[in-house]
Image (spheres, rainbow, N blue to C red):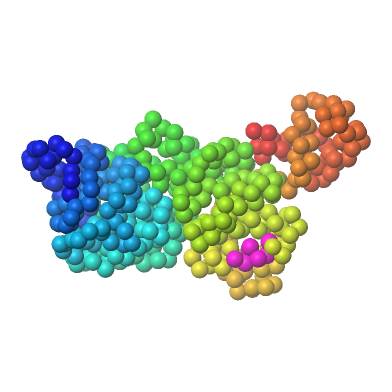
Amino acid sequence: MTIERRAILHPSRTHELRATAHRIVNGSLPGTLPARPTQVDLAQLRTLDVGVTPQLWTEANVQLLEGMLIARVRLDDLDSALDLVDAHFTEGRLRGRAVLGLDSLGSLFAAVAETYAVAGRPRDAGLYSSRALTFAASEAVRYRAAAVQTLVFAVNGEFSSAAASREACADLARTNRWNVADTDHALTVADILLGAGTLDAPRTERAAALLRSIAPRDPYAQHAAATAEAIALVLRGDLTAGAAGLRSAIGGAWSHLSHRLMRQLALSVLAEATLAQGSARRSLALLEALESSPSHAVCFEAHRAAAHLALGDDRAALHATDGCLALGAEHCPRTLAIVLVRRAVARDRLGQSAAADDLFDEACNLAHHAGDLIAPFISVPREQLAPLRERLRERRPDLAAAVADATEEFHRREPRAPQALPALTPRERSVASVMRGGKTYGEIAGEFTVSINTIKSQMRSLFAKLGVSTRDEAVVMLERHGFYL
């Protein structure tokens, strides 16, 4: 392997870098009781230039490459980590010949899988995590591979598989009597994702506490722990405190020392919490210009759709998620179920019941298969889901019963969100936008070049949809939902 020029000129420097890589790689394995790699260790390998692929991979240069991958992932330099993977791996294997032990391959492939997972590419990650498990010869490397596989499943929303893989890690830890401080970094991140994804506040809190204890000097771990603690508050129904914690995690002075996956998760939960507080416009503002991960494991488009539905703009909800459908099988199935439910509501409110039912059927089947029958239905008012659920009960009583059973307990303890705005036509939205501010009917009519009677008729139609009887009451309701923000 070609290293930076100084390493070639100074053998002592080469030895130092290899020793650093050894500490980082061994620090990712349980039971070896190494000193945890410091931020300085990680920074040393993060900036190293790996050079061209060697003619022959050996244990020494493979461990250096693995250390560089781990360093880049831990310090959130994902683009550089992916460049390393692209340069030295193809189709689940190393480029070039190799003389390596099985554990070396297993550990290296686990690092590649973790890189892909935290970059939001669970399919690529799954290929390498399965190879890592295949090659793992020792129980320590098997644990590392299973921990990364747990993260891969959690990122892709395969919670049942993630739970099984998580239990395999726990069995290995118990059998070998490993210390809790040896818990793999990927496993703690997976625990946060599992807690948040299954709406399990205690699990999310336990994951945060574990991170606090095992990595007290790692700012990236501490940021992830703070994010998890704020998410747990939201899950417990304390939206105000949870949203404040998430805003601090996202915009605090130390937020640059954080992982992309945690930032995306924080923004995702904050958008939902803000919407649940009745501020659809603020939720949209949070999401402005944000891009989802490649597989949409965190799908900002789904959150935009929920905000548009709350504002009564069904066509905007559909437009926001058109790209999700275009991804086809590349879209994360868990978040795709969420997208499909929100599109089904939009279609149903537009009077397209047959299309709505098809979308709702697909969403419920996806959610049932993934073992997540709660997440697709949160942030959508129950009265909007009621007709879809009723028709599902007529077609698929078994599936409808499973959805009802899964969501009943959650609905009992979820915070009461203001009722969403009904679907508004473009003309009704235009009229609503100019109702406050004291303009007379004549002034409003002049803006739209229509008669005063036409404006009055359009306002009466709007009042009926909003369930109010006066212009002042309509403005209050629109303000409550953040329509004017």
Query: In the drawing, does residue 408 fall left or right of residue 74?
Result: right
Magenta residue check for 406: no
Residue 137 percent location from the top left of the image: 19, 67
Residue 149 percent location from the top left of the image: 34, 61
Residue 482 visible from this viewpoint: yes
Residue 138 percent location from the top left of the image: 18, 65
Tell me if residue 245 comes above or below residue 87 in the rendering: above
Work out whether residue 440 or residue 469 is closer to the camera in this orientation and state it.
440
Residue 221 percent location from the top left of the image: 32, 43
Query: In the drawing, does residue 107 fall left or right of residue 399?
Result: left
Query: In the drawing, does residue 140 fall left or right of residue 252?
Result: left
Magenta residues, dominant SS class: helix
Query: In the drawing, does residue 15 fall left or right of residue 172?
Result: left
Disc tally is 0
- Identity of the residue drawn at 69% across and 62% down: 355
Tell me if residue 278 comes above or below residue 451 in the rendering: below
- Segment colored magenta: 356-362
Tell me if residue 398 comes above or below residue 329 in the rendering: below
- Identity of the residue drawn at 71% across and 58% down: 348
